[in-house]
Image: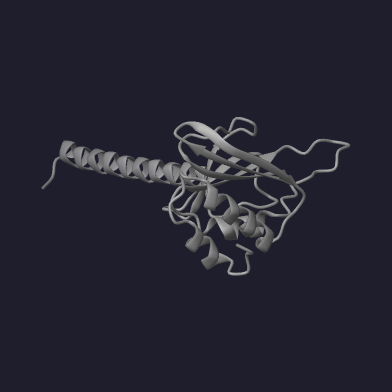
Amino acid sequence: MESEDDVLRRMLRRMIEMASRSQAVARGAEADASLSREYLSAVGPETPPGYYQYLADRRAWRRGGDPGSWRPSSNGLYVVLHEAAGYCRSCRDFVDLASGASGGLIFVVEISAPEPDRRPQSRLSISCVHEGEVLEERSYRGTMGLPELSSLVLRFVRICPSVDAAAASIRAVCPCSEY
C-alpha cells in the first residue's frame, strides 16, 4: 500500500508534467502566431501598412518593415507596387505575376496608410540593381492589368544583368505579355 507521501509525490509529478506540456503547447501556438504575422499567403486591400517581399521559395509574402523603410538589399530586378491601405487595386495581378518570380526577380508591395483628403493612386517602380549600383530605375503611375505589368517586367528583364532567365517564368504566368 502506498504511503501518503508517495501519493503526494505522484500527484506532484503529474501536475509538473501537465504544466510543462501546457507550456510547450502555448509556446508552439505563440510561435505559429508570430509566423502567421510575418508571412502572408497573399496581399490585398485588407493588408496592414508595411512593406512585403515575395519569397518564391516559401510561396509567401514576408513583412519586412514599415512603409518607406524598404531598400534594395541585394542584386536583382526589383518590382515594387506602392499602394494605400484599403485600396490595392493592382494587387491581384501583381500577386499573380510574383508567383513567377525567379532568377533575381524580386517583388515587393509597399502599403502606406491612407491620407485623408487625398485620392490614393497606385505607383509601380522597377529598379535594376547590379553590383550594388542602381543601373536603371523607372516609375509608373496608375493601375495596370496583368498584360501591362508583365510587359514592363519583361522589358526590364532583358536589360538587367542581375536577372537570370526570369522571362520564361513570367511568360508562364502571362503569355499575353508583349515581350
Do we see residue 85 in this rendering? no
Residue at screen point 23% across, 40% down:
13
Q: In this figure, what is the number of numbered marks?
A: 0
Q: Residue furthest right?
A: 117
The answer to whether residue 86 is above or below residue 69 is: below
Q: Residue furthest bottom?
A: 175
The answer to whether residue 29 is above or below residue 170 is: above
Quarter residue 71 falls in: top right
Residue at screen point 72% across, 45% down:
140
x, y (%) of residue 171? Answer: 54, 65
Do we see residue 55 in this rendering? yes
x, y (%) of residue 92? Answer: 65, 59
x, y (%) of residue 109? Answer: 61, 45
Left or right side of 148 for 108: left
**Residue sitting nearer the eye, 118 or 175:** 175
Residue at screen point 86% across, 38% down:
118
Q: Quadrant of the C terminus?
A: bottom right
x, y (%) of residue 138? Answer: 66, 41
Q: Residue furthest front?
A: 159
**Residue sitting nearer the eye, 28 or 174:** 174
Residue at screen point 68% across, 59% down:
148
